[in-house]
Amino acid sequence: MRIGELAALLGVSTRTVRYYHHQGVLPEPPRLANGYREYGMRDAIALARVRRLVELGLSLDEVRDVVADDRSRELPEILAEIDADLARQEREIQARRARLATMRERFQAGTLGPDDTASPDLVDFLQVVGMPASKAAAWDRDLLVLMDSMPAAHGKGRFFEMFESMAADPEATARGHDFYRRLDELAEAEPGDPRIAPLAAALAEYSMKHLPVDAAPGSPEWDPEAMEPFLEDLAPAQADVVRRTIALIAGSVPTATLPFDRPDPLRPPPAYAELRESSPVAPVRTPDGRRAWLVTSYDAVAAVLADRRFGLAPPGDETPGNDTLFQDGEAHTRLRRLVSKTFNPRGIALLGPRVEQLADELVSGLSRPADLVAGLATPLSITVIGELLGVAIEDRDRFLRLADATGGVDFTFGPAEDVAAAGRAWEELGAFAAELVTETRRRPGDDLFSGLITVRDTADGRLSDGELGAMVTTLVAAGYLSVRNAVATAALRLLAEERLAAFVPEHVDEVLRLQSGMTAEPFPRYAQADLELAGVPISAGDLVLVRLEAAHRDPAHFADPDRYDPARNSSPPLVFGHGLHYCLGAPLARMEVAAALAALARQLPGLRLGVPVADIEWTHGTTDRGPVALPVTW
C-alpha cells in the first residue's frame, strides 16, 4: 500500500507518518524503482504501536527508546517516570489546598488582605515585586486580581509565565516600578503629551521581552476595545499609554506558525496572499518556536535582500570565514570580486553548447517509464557542477553521494538528528573539497575551478585553500541541489498544466518566477540594527524570513500574477536574489533549466505525468524543496 493508504488505515495523516519517519520512531521501507515506498502489514503494525504509545502519553523520545533495537529503556521504566510526574502534580495540588486553608483561616480571623483573594501564583508574584505606593500600580494590581478571578480569562496561564519571568529578574522589577512612576506623572497631562509615545514603546518592549512565545494577538488581552471598560479609572494620557502599548504588542506577537498549509503543491500557501494584503511584514512563529518576521510583498522582500543591515548571522555572531553564501560586508565583497573574474556571464555563456548537449543526451537516453529526477535533473546538474570543478569521472559517484547527503535537511528548523547527519556529510564534503583543491593546484586543467585557483588581484590577493574549498560546497548547495529541484519542479509544473510541448528557452524566466521560492528561498536574515521595514519597527537581532513565492505573486508588480505569461513585461523577478548576494551562477542555472525543458519539449512531445500531482513526494531542505521522484511516460 502507499503512504496515503497506510495513513487512512490507521486514522492518521500522511504528514504524521512522514514525521514519525523523520523522528526515527517508524522505520522507512525501501523505495521501489519508481521512487515510491511500498508499505505492508509489518509497517501498519509498527505504526499502530507508535500511535498507541503516543496516546498513552509517551513523548517521541520515549517512544523511540521503546521501539529501538537495543531497547535501551523498557516500557515499565518509562511508565514509572510518567507516574512520578503525576505524583509531582499531585503534591502541587496538595500545596495549593494548604494555601487555600490558610486563606480561609485568615478570612475567619478578619485579617485577609485585598491581594489574598488572588491565586497563590499571583499572590507570590505581588509579594516578590513589592507593588509600590502608586496609583498606576494600584490600578494594575486591581486589574491583575480581577483577571485572575475570571475562570475563563483568555491567556491567563501565559500571563503567569510572564510574571515568573519578571519576578526572577530584579532589573525587570526595578523597571516596572519606574513605569508606574512615569505613568503617575501623566495623571494631569493632556492626551497629546509628547511623553506618551516613548513610554508606550518602552512598556511594549518591556512586556515583549518577558512575553511567552505562544502568546497571540486577537485575544482579549491584546484587544484595545476589550480593554476600554478597564481604562475608565485612568487619566486620559495614562489610558492613551495603555492603548498604544497594547496596539504595539498586538502588532509584534506571532499570529501564525510556519510552515503554512499548502493545499496545492504547485501553488503558494493561501496565507501568503492574505498576509501580503494585510501585513506584508508580519510576526510569525517558526517551527522551533522562535519569533520571526515574515516578509511577503515584492517591495519589502527586495528591500531586505538589498539592505546590508540585514545580515546572514545575528549581530555579533561570526559567519564562516571562507563561504560567499554566508559572508556579509567587505569580506563578501572581496570574495565576490575574485570569484567573478572567472565565474561571470561571458565565461558561463561558453558553457551553453555543452549544457545543451548533456540535456539532449540525457533525454534521448530515457526509457519508458522514466523518473525525471533520477534520469535528468540529478545527472544534468551534478555533471555540470562536476565538470566546472574538474571532478574526475571516478570520483563522481562519491561526489554525488555527499551532495545528496547534504540536501533535504532543514539546518535552521529541522530535527536535531537529521541536522547532525547532514552536518557530518558537509564535513566529509569539505574534506573532499580540500583534496580537490590540492589535486587541482598540482594538475590544473581548463575547467572553471582551475581558473579560480590561478586568479589573482592586486587589491584582493588570491583565494586561499579554505576559500576555494568553500566554493565547492557553495556550488553544491546553489549549483546542484537548487538546480536539480528547479529542473524537476519546472518539468512537473509544465506537464501538470500541459504547457511543456510549447516551451522554448525564452520562457524560462516566467517558469522560474512562478516556482521560485517553492524550490529555493533566500537564507534567513537577521537585523543588524534597529530599523523600519515597510513601516514596521524591527529590532536588532530579529529573525527575518523573506518569501519569494509571495513576492512573485504580488499584483502590485505582476498583473494577474497567477497566470503563466512568458511575454509579460513586469518588475524583474527576484529568483536569484537582489543586491549584495545576487547569485553569480544565475546565468548557468537559467541555462540548465532552459536546456532541460527544451530537450524534453523537442524530443518527447507526448510526455505526460505517470502519477497524479498529489502523489508526488517532496524533499525539504533549509531553503530548497523539490520532488523526490517525478514519474513520467509517453
Image (tube, rainbow, N blue to C red):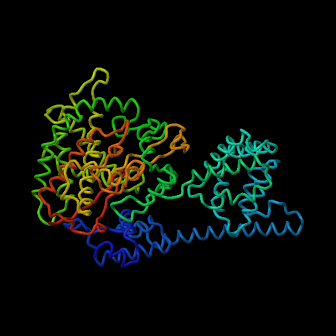
* Residue depicted at x 26% and y 35%: 468
Residue 302, percent from left and from top: 41, 42
Residue 355 figure quarter: top left
Seen in the picture, residue 536 relative to 233 is either above or below; the reply is above
Say left or right for 113 vs 631: right
Q: In which quadrant will I find the C terminus? A: bottom left
Say left or right for 602 vs 42: left
Residue 138, percent from left and from top: 80, 53
Say left or right for 120 vs 613: right
* Residue depicted at x 19% and y 40%: 388
Residue 563 figure quarter: bottom left
Residue 402: tell me if it is visible: no
In this figure, what is the number of numbered marks? 0
Q: In which quadrant will I find the N terminus? A: bottom left
Comparing 389 with 121, the one in front is: 389
* Residue depicted at x 49% and y 75%: 56
Comparing 200 with 433, the one in front is: 200
Residue 312, percent from left and from top: 42, 41
Residue 93, percent from left and from top: 68, 69
Residue 592: tell me if it is visible: yes
Seen in the picture, residue 519 relative to 576 is either above or below; the reply is below
Comparing 381 with 487, the one in front is: 487
The residue sitting at the right extreme is 110
